[in-house]
Amino acid sequence: MVNLDEKYMELALELAALGEGDVNPNPMVGSVVVKDGEIIGRGYHKKYGGPHAEVFALEEAGKRAEGATIYVTLEPCSHYGKTPPCAEKIVKMGIKRCVIATLDPNPLVAGKGVKLLEEAGIEVKINVLKNTALKQNVVFFKYIEKKIPYLFLKCAITLDGKIATESGDSKWISNEISRERVQRLRHKYMGIMVGINTLLGDNPRLNARIDGGNNPHRIVIDPGLKTPEDYNFIQNNRDNKSIIVTSKENIDSEKHLKFEKKYNVKFIFLDGNRFLMTEILEKIGKIGIDSILLEGGNSMISMAFKEKALDGGEIFIAPKITGDNNAIPFVSGFKIGNMKESIELKEAKFRIYGDNVAIEFSL
């Protein structure tokens, strides 16, 4: 027998996914309005600062919304932010029943939306497809609760686990299909981060090269402030999204002041010359970046694994073998006595991109 609440919530979750990469640091939210077995309104949160999913769905339903059921993937907001409270609009439109996938952990909401609806006499049902909704907004839930960005690893490796030759050459390990997938990841996550060696070796653009894609904030970890002025990271900062994490020793240096004033590069200063991933993430979280795609290199990836700072990732494996002990591995620096001590990737999912195999995982 079909569970109608789950059926309509599935549709709401599909709608929510359409906002991926466009709503950060807000959550993805979808909504459906149903009356007498007919869908009369659909909506999703399309862009940060714009109307919420419920608004689009209710406006499409119009006067027919009176006496209807609304399905929402996240608890309707009850406070004034960039938009008016959605819970108040639900009441005003005469909705009879509200089905919610999961409550909103945001302290400004956190049950207050449900309370407002119930006090208005609206029947409320929660936790319908809750686990699916939680997974869909894993970035939002981590950031709203901890103010620390969700960290997702992307790397391409050979079959023997290398990300570059001894000389640093890495173009190209993965195939074109895999690289197209990477552009989607760059659109999805709010920031992209590399170490200074990767920047110097590749001179990457660190943008999302897809139609309608949002370029992430570009972050380079550069303790010694070695970033060259003529590199893409500096020269292509027309969107003011380039950020350098460097040592406090470089404050007011000639390069710092020039990059800041001439190119509008933002700086995060940390103590010493060797940084912890945890302190990097904490500082980045404070400037409103909710998620980061970590693209290398070896030292950055190894540090993230050692500090257990990764939340997940996708590793692309190409059918290539270097056979070179001096080629650069994607992760190193661990010493274990037996296989039980190795890091286990959880919830592994396998995808095929032409002749590449990818493992998506969580930690």
Image (tube, rainbow, N blue to C red):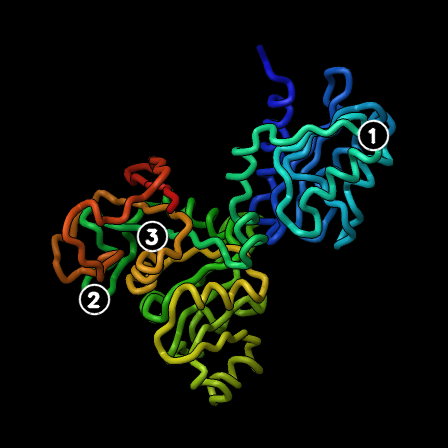
Q: Which of these two is toward me, 32 or 323? A: 32
Q: Is residue 363 left or right of residue 20?
A: left
Q: Residue at x 28, y 61 (%)?
A: 298
Label 2 residue SS: loop
Circle 3: residue type = Cys
Q: Which residue is mark 3?
A: 155
Q: Which of these two is toward me, 58 or 4? A: 4
Foreground disc of the pair 1, 3: 1
Q: Residue at x 79, y 32 (%)?
A: 60
Label 3 residue SS: strand
Name the disc covering residue 87, or none: none
Give the CA distance from mark 1 to mark 3: 52 Å
Q: Is residue 148 left or right of residue 359?
A: right
Q: Residue at x 75, y 54 (%)?
A: 81
The first of marks 1 and 3 along the sequence is 1
Q: Which residue is mark 1?
A: 121
Residue 117 occupies quadrant? top right
The first of marks 2 and 1 along the sequence is 1
Q: Which residue is mark 2?
A: 167
Give the CA distance from mark 3 to mark 2: 18 Å
Q: Is residue 302 left or right of residue 144?
A: left
Circle 1: residue type = Gly
Circle 2: residue type = Ser
Q: Residues within 10 Å of mark 3 (few under 14, many from 20)?
A: many
